[in-house]
Amino acid sequence: MSSPEHKQKIWKLIKDVKVGMLVTQGDGVPHARPMHLVQDDYDGTLWFFTRASAEKVFEARKDSEVCLSFSDQDDGVYVSLSGHANLHRDQGLIDKFWNPFVAAWFPEGKDDPDVTLLEISVQSGEHWKAKESKAYQLYEVARANLDKDHTPDMGENEKFGTV
């Protein structure tokens, strides 16, 4: 888990990315697929809509440990979050998070019995944020190749939580 300040930092890194790659386990093999955030803030839990009949739902029921990764190459942001998946068919939550983007994927509407919310309770993670331009990063790599005592300074990296 992380502090309220750290949760704000994580949200600041991922809120504009919007789409993360969700990794579940199926038959001992990891499966990744894009998932779109539906919330407006972050308190340690991430929410996504999915179909109850989707393969990821069966995989999450079998093994609730999942990983999510977010990437924004333009801003040098990379976030990896690990946690536990839970499924919800709570109409109040569905109403709260329903939006036109989600509606496009569910033509039967929010009352469709196949509409389900996937909740990821984040337990740990790691994030990277480049503090300088790509040109500076290239300079740092070149300098490290010329000077074996130099380690490239590519920006911020932080791990948090417990597994």
Image (cartoon, helix red, strand yellow):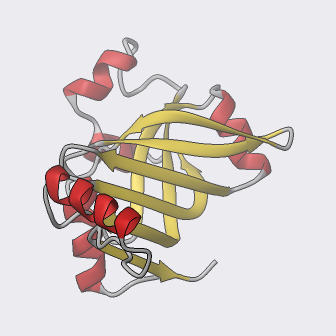
| Residue 62 visible, this angle | yes
Of residue 92 and residue 21, the one placed in the foreground of this image is: 21
Image coordinates of residue 91 in percent, x first then y, are 40, 43
Which residue is outermost to the bottom?
3
Which residue is outermost to the front?
146
- In the rendered image, the vertical position of residue 156 relative to residue 39, given as above or below: below
* In this rendering, position of residue 112 left or right of residue 157: right
What residue is shown at x 58% (from left), y 82% (from top)? 162
Image coordinates of residue 87 in percent, x first then y, are 58, 49
| Residue 89 visible, this angle | no
- In the rendered image, the vertical position of residue 41 relative to residue 98, given as above or below: below
Which residue is outermost to the top?
107
Image quadrant holding the C terminus, namely: bottom right
* In this rendering, position of residue 57 left or right of residue 25: left
* In this rendering, position of residue 22 left or right of residue 37: right
What residue is shown at x 63% (from left), y 27% (from top)? 54
Image coordinates of residue 126 in percent, x first then y, are 45, 70
What residue is shown at x 53% (from left), y 44% (from top)? 22
